[in-house]
Image: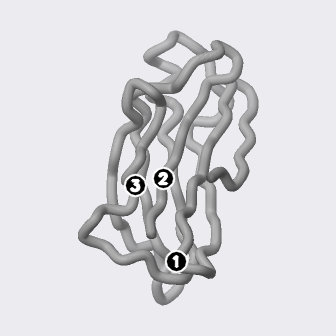
């Protein structure tokens, strides 16, 4: 299936648009880059795993470059970037990895 994300700024109550994101997969104990993207106006990246890649089981990392977002909104953010590492065990499922963000905290979960 695929990997997607949605980034919401819960302090401002709106999507976090324009945030650079990088997807990588662990291979031979090193991160192998897969794709770079940017959240759209709705704070989404629906196709973080490109159509040219097949979802494989393993360990993946989504890196959100939050410093760029904080600068854009003139915020002093505590986390210059956030990395979410997760395991893909069933390649027939879609993995949606949302991030709820504030300048001084964040949370994530497996979405649908």
Question: Along the horizontal axis of the image, is 53 left or right of 112?
Answer: left
Which percent across, then down, holds residue 92? Answer: 52, 77
Q: Secondary structure at mark 3?
A: loop
Of mark 1 and mark 3, the one earlier in the sequence is 3
Q: Which residue corresponds to the image point at 31% horizontal and 73% vertical from the top-left?
A: 53
Mark closer to the chain start, 2 or 3 = 2
C-alpha span from label 2 to label 3: 5 Å
- Circle 1 sits on which residue? 92
Q: Earlier in the sequence, mark 1 or mark 2?
A: 2
Residue 112's place in the image compared with 91, above or below, is above
Q: CA distance from mark 1 to mark 2?
A: 14 Å
Mark 1, mark 2: which one is toward the viewer? 1
- Percent coordinates x, y for residue 108 in the rendering: 71, 46
Label 3 crowding class (10 Å Cα cut-off): few <14, some 14-19, many 20+? many
Q: Residue furthest bottom?
A: 28
Disc number lying in front (1 or 3)? 1
> Which one is in front, 44 or 102?
44
> Is 109 rendered above or below residue 9?
below
Question: Picture quarter containing residue 102?
Answer: top right
Residue under label 3: 48
- Nearest the camera: 3 or 19? 3
Which label number is shown at residue 4?
A: 2
Element under label 1? Answer: loop
The foreground one among 1 and 58 is 1
Quarter holding the N terminus is bottom left
């Amino acid at each position: 299936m695929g990997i997607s994300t949605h980034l919401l700024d819960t302090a401002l109550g709106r999507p976090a648009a324009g945030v650079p994101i990088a997807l990588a997969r662990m291979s031979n104990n090193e991160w192998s880059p897969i794709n770079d993207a940017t959240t759209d106006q709705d704070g989404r990246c629906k196709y973080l795993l490109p159509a040219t890649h097949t979802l494989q089981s393993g360990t993946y990392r989504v890196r959100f470059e939050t410093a760029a977002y904080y600068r854009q909104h003139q915020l002093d953010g505590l986390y210059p970037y956030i990395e979410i590492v997760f395991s893909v065990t069933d390649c027939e499922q879609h993995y949606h990895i949302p991030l709820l963000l504030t300048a001084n905290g964040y949370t994530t979960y497996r979405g649908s």
